[in-house]
Image (cartoon, grey):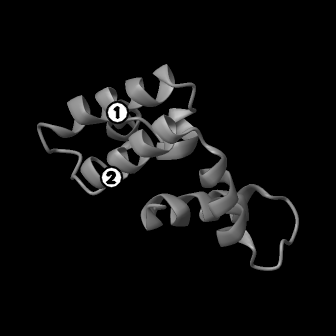
């Protein structure tokens, strides 16, 4: 089953970066991209969204979980930044 958070994030990326109007089909395109991912990559990205995405940056476990799930995604050939967004350290560094 597709993780709604991951689908919503991907639909936003598609909408913001498409460079042309796609008539509100972002959700369908995101679903197609997610469905095309290998099972291991999709599962790891869903786990990242469940375990990491909503943790505050100050949470002591967030960085370790972020690094771990990103390694799993990369190991199976996925693009962790596309699927999960900026890395924990990048977010901390950019925080004002």
User: In the rendered view, does 10 fall on the left or right side of 70?
Assistant: right
Q: Is residue 22 visible?
A: yes
The residue sitting at 63% across, 64% down in the picture is 11
In this view, the mark in front (1 or 2): 1
The residue sitting at 88% across, 65% down in the picture is 20
Assign the N terminus to one quadrant of the image: bottom left
Q: Position of residue 81 (x, y in %)?
A: 53, 37
Residue at mark 2: 53
User: In the rendered view, does 57 fall on the left or right side of 33?
Assistant: left
Which residue is at the far right?
Answer: 20
Along the viewing direction, whichever of 41 and 82 lies nearer the viewer: 41
Along the viewing direction, whichever of 93 and 24 lies nearer the viewer: 24
Total numbered labels placed on residues in the image: 2
Residue 57, disc? none
Crowd class of label 2 (few under 14; some 14 to 19; many from 20; radius 10 Å): some
Residue at mark 1: 69
User: In the rendered view, does 48 fall on the left or right side of 24?
Assistant: left
């Amino acid at each position: 089953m597709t993780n709604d958070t991951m689908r919503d994030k991907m639909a936003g990326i598609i909408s913001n970066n498409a460079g042309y109007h796609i008539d509100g089909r972002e959700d369908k395109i995101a679903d197609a991209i997610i469905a095309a991912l290998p099972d291991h990559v999709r599962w790891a990205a869903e786990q990242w969204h469940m375990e990491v995405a909503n943790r505050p940056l100050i949470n002591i476990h967030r960085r370790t979980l972020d690094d771990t799930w990103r390694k799993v995604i990369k190991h199976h050939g996925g693009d962790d930044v596309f699927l999960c967004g900026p890395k924990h350290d990048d977010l901390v560094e950019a925080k004002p």
